[in-house]
Image: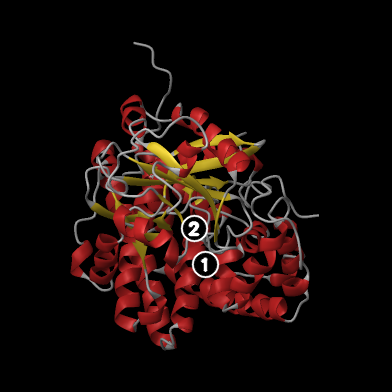
Amino acid sequence: MAIFWTPLRYSERQALGLRARKQLPRSEHARLTISECPQDPLELLRASMRDRVAHLIPLKYERMAASPFGFFRGAVPIMAADLSCHPHTGLITQICGDAHVLNLGAFAALDGRLVFDINDFDETIRGPFEYDVKRLAASLILAGREAGIKRGARHGAVLHFLRQYRTWMHRFAAMPVLELARYQIHRLAEMEPMPAILAQAERSTPLKILRTLTEPDATGPGSALQRRGPAPRRPDAAALARVFRSGPPLLERLPSREADAVLAALGPYVQTLQPERQHFLQQYRPQDVAFKVVGTGSVGLRDYVIYCEGPGCQHGSDPLFLQIKQEAVSAYARYLPESSRHSHQGHRVVEGQRAMQLTSDPFLGYTTLEGRDYLVRQLSDHKASLDLDHLTAASLLGYADLCGEVLSRGHARAGDPVAMAAYLGSSDRFDQAVLSFARSYADKTEHDWKLLRGSNLLRSFRSGPGPKKMAASTP
């Protein structure tokens, strides 16, 4: 019987991992040689602002300037360049690309369960597994420093994360394929800081988002979108329609022409969903559209939110919020050209997310708007993540424990856990090397952060077209 692929034997996969040690010995992961990375970090930042909404760029810089960890969140282009200056293992999997402690969190699965997983994939790409490991390790150091956690506890958390990552990779390597594919983490409620994160996720309901982001529209019955066209669908509704609560520049309702363009992009998006999910979505009717600023790394990219209502008898009884988020080329793409096979960046993110996550947003898809690529997903449906303001040594250690398991699972799902486990081995040689790298990279991040604070970038962009001008970009 003919087959279209010939999988490697277990022993051959192990041999791949062991050969990778010759390409890059595990102890070499400690090395961070700044002299080998000649690119100016602030020039890399400036170049990454191309095609962003000009008047929002100072806001991104201000968020990065707030703290070294804030800088780290927005500095993926810098770390991608720094990693590219050093050898890698050649053991390729799907990487998140922006693995840090706030890009893992809780969210609702389709069946209503709260799950904990990686939840930001703007930078995802096929790349060396250690890129994610090093970035997450450095983020633990920086988050611990920001929270005032002592050096020994910070380093202990990083080593625990790395040990968990390595231990679980060996477990995943021994699992049957389908057992790995459906592997769930069942100990979420057992360790700090997960009870607080899960409680926050429980409270982050669509109805709470409705109260936070919208307000009653006193101008008349029916939705604001409906009143521009035919008669309202339900003029006898008991409650007034709701619209987004404008608070520029972070949230601002769009005028008719721009709103219509955003809504038109839903047509191609629907075709990227599975048929039964198309059926669910098509029972919702759009009510209002706004421009929204999100995150740190994404500030300046175009991001739209659509408030939709289900077929309930009263306005606001069945809300759905969709986010249409512009996706740029991954910062790693220029350094990993063999991994950059996607012509549509929203499609790249969707595929990467589905590869790494156990369960993904049921309305995850992609579209194109005015020649730019966009990801579409639900906005903040039961989402919650780590609170750095209440981080302790114990909660950092518990969080590191889960981060190791979650990241290992994502890499094992999308790559070859046997080869990666063989490379990692049973000793802590890899762990100690990455800890050394993480300390050095946290120091470099603080240095780059100080460069930003002393530069004129915070004052470089004083004016520009507002968010309503959807075609606006930087000079």
Residue 44 appears in view = yes
Question: Residue 270 shows which numbered tag?
Answer: none
Q: Earlier in the sequence, mark 1 or mark 2?
A: 1
Residue 430 location (% of width, % of height):
45, 65
Q: Residues within 10 Å of mark 1 (few under 14, many from 20)?
A: some
Question: Where the N terminus falls, by quadrant?
Answer: top left
Is 56 placed above or below 338 here? below
Q: Where is mark 1, residue-wise?
A: 27
CA distance for labels 1 and 2: 17 Å
The residue shown at (43%, 67%) is 101
Is 429 placed above or below 84 here? below
Residue 12 appears in view = no
Residue 448 location (% of width, % of height):
67, 75
The amino acid type found where label 1 is placed reads Ser
The residue shown at (60%, 46%) is 255
Q: Where is mark 2, residue-wise?
A: 132
